[in-house]
Image (spheres, helix red, strand yellow):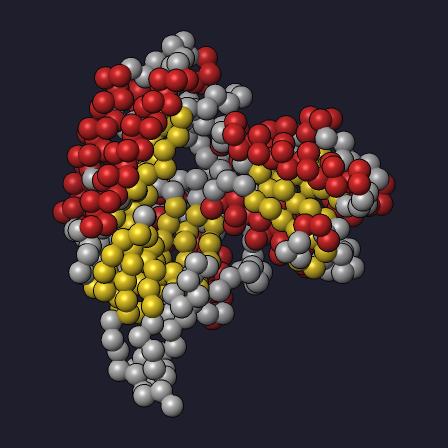
Amino acid sequence: MGKGKRFFIETYGCEMNKSDSLDIAVSLERQGYVRTSDALEADVVVINTCSVRRHAEQRVYGRLGYYRGLKKSGRKDRAIVLAGCMAQRLGREAQRRFPEIAVVAGTSHNLRIPLYLSEYQNTKIPVAKTKLGGYEFSRPEDRRPEGHHAWVTIIKGCSNYCSYCIVPYVRGPELSKPSGDITAEVDALVDRGVTEITLLGQNVNAYGKDSGDISFADLLERLDHISGLRWIRFLTSHPKDFDVDVIRRISGLGKVCRHFHLPLQSGSDRVLSLMNRGYSIRHYMSIVEALNRFVGDFAITTDIIVGFPTETDEDFKKTLSVYEEVGFDDAFTYRYSKRPHIAAGALDGEVDPAVAQDRLERLIDVVRRTEDEKNRSLLGEECEVLVVKKSRKNPSEFLAKTEHGKLVACRPTGGRPTADAPAFGPGSFIRVRIEGISGKTLRGSEVLRRYALSD
């Protein structure tokens, strides 16, 4: 269908959206389209969107305005595709606001975008497909762009209906990918040189509950046995489904990274109840205690919302208290954003925006201080890291990450690679000594290994 036409994808939002964009790229390439890194030369521009916060949608409106201007001044035949959560929410309303949108493809329709483009090109009638259901996962044989790392979607959708969140309405209920397909996909990735995977889902801990397939812990144990795979990560966990048994089983797996992203959202039980989170602070702290007991050396990061309707100063102080008690390594922090459909929108007691902003800034100060303390405690230590890419700021340095998910800027020791000391580059695992800190990034040097002497 594409016949050599060029496509460009820009992505907004979470890792799930980034993974979805890879699926869209595969579906287009399968039909003859060719990827370009320059939007100006693209015949098709796909904007894969997020709808979790109002700001995310505003950014997309800005981009649509930009492409409208380009169409007026030049390429009138460029097809614009609006995909993802915002497309799911707005449907044809998006085309009424921006008639230049050729295709609106909701979250269940990623792999069918080439078909919709063909329909548009044949009829010149805008296409909008937003019916939830019939979601297709990528296939094990699909060669999604990857190097040493790959995202693997294991469950899509969400059935939790947190009162502040639009995701269940735009992605539908939980749907698990068959475990056999996941294992086959990871096997194929490892055969292509992937050494690290990240399992993705709105709630990975719920894996298998909708289908009666194996549990999330069972899946981790199965993947842990795949030869050639070095590290396994997963995003995102929900505290109500993360229990002591899962932690105990993870503690016996050598490939699962000791980095846990566990959204807290609030330190107040009253606010958590209004959020419909399904757990208490006591339960959350029991998870942290179990991690300390069974795992020991681990990093924990989180998400926190401030300014939720009716949140008081006392509620906010509880959030700060829990944050410091846990000693999180980092946090994604947000001001509450009112979205369509969500139950929280009907609550009285809206927090003054200035108060919410002040709380956010105070929280960020605590996050930065705690993160700095954690990072300083690592000075002088040695650890294994995975080299990710060359540094943009300093070509002689590489950026790497630790098992705990911390970024390290480091330099190779030099010398010619041997069997005992393979080439230093993206995808290689090396040991570094942490020697300094620059902002949020650790600085280190490769621990001297036995290289052959350079010629």
Locate the C terminus and report the quarter of the image it occupies.
bottom left
Q: Picture coordinates of residue 380 (x, y %)?
A: 17, 60
Q: Picture coordinates of residue 96 (x, y %)?
A: 73, 26
Instruction: Specify whether 377 is left or right of 166.
Output: left
| Residue most extreme to the top | 348
Locate the N terminus and report the quarter of the image it occupies.
bottom right
Q: Picture coordinates of residue 259 (x, y %)?
A: 29, 50
Instruction: Residue at 54%, 36% (x, y): give it.
Output: 50
Residue 261 visible in rendering:
yes
Total labels: the figure holds 0
Q: Is residue 363 above or below residue 8?
A: above
Front-most of residues 349 and 207: 349
| Residue most extreme to the left | 293
Instruction: Residue at 30%, 42% (x, y): give it.
Output: 330
Residue 156 visible in rendering:
no
Q: Is residue 391 above or below residue 310?
A: below
Front-most of residues 336 and 39: 39
Instruction: Specify whether 359 is left or right of 191.
Output: left
Q: Picture coordinates of residue 37 (x, y %)?
A: 63, 56
Instruction: Residue at 52%, 50% (x, y): give it.
Output: 19
Q: Is residue 63 above or below residue 118?
A: above
| Residue most extreme to the right | 123
Instruction: Residue at 57%, 62% (x, y): give it.
Output: 143
Instruction: Specify whether 223 is left or right of 318.
Output: right
